[in-house]
Image: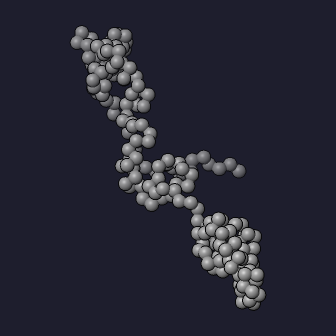
Amino acid sequence: MQRATHSRYRKDIRIKPERPEPRPSARACARPDCGKEGTHRVPRSRDDLHDHLWFCLEHARAHNESWDYFRGMSEDEIRAFQDEAVIGHRPTWPLGKRTARSRQGNGNYEDRFGVFGATSEPPRPPERRITGVQERALDVLNLDASATLQQIKARYKELVKRFHPDANGGDRGAEERLKQVIKAYGVLRASGLT
């Protein structure tokens, strides 16, 4: 069984039938001695390339053969035009300039990979993350979280000398304190802070 190819439901529904686009009125060739239709557009002058003349094919060819865009320009003007043509005659500026102006509106961002080069704030050293055990060990040594390796070692040596049993005549309180200092220093060493 074969279906009908012309179904009444498959018709193209349009409100208005398509009309052929009106053809623009024929232009006459811009040469006064020519009566042909001007079908080819050519620029009138290099100063205004958007202003055109319309020529027939023969006169458009003749115009293009005699056309010299750079006529009347010096070598420096031609070189400057060629340099600007590389970037499409758009304004540009060297990279790295105008940084003060760009910093005004850059907001509060962090350029971790240094893509933008200049940042609004000087780079800060990464903050050291400290666990609770490390914090208690630093408290035993009476140091804060920003203590350096040299400060930790110096404080450890100082407290060991102060609480050593030979220096305290066998005092049990000093001995307990010495055990805490040694244990705290061991925790810091094991965790990599020293």
Q: Is residue 35 above or below residue 146?
A: above
Tell me if I can see residue 36 in this picture: no
- The structure residue drawn at horizontal position 33% and vertical position 19%, both measured from the top left corner, is 77
Query: Is 188 positioned to the left or the right of 114 in the image?
Result: right
Residue 143 occupies which quadrant of the picture? bottom right
Q: Is residue 182 above or below residue 92?
A: below
Residue 168 occupies which quadrant of the picture? bottom right
Q: Is residue 103 above or below residue 41?
A: below
Residue 173 occupies which quadrant of the picture? bottom right
Depth check, front residue: 190 or 110: 190
In x, y percent, where is residue 144? 59, 74
- The structure residue drawn at horizontal position 76% and vertical position 83%, both measured from the top left corner, is 165
- The structure residue drawn at horizontal position 38% and vertical position 39%, both measured from the top left corner, is 19
- The structure residue drawn at horizontal position 68% and vertical position 68%, both measured from the top left corner, is 153
Q: Is residue 93 above or below residue 3?
A: above
Q: Quadrant where the C terminus lies?
A: bottom right
Check the image and name the residue furthest to the bottom. 172
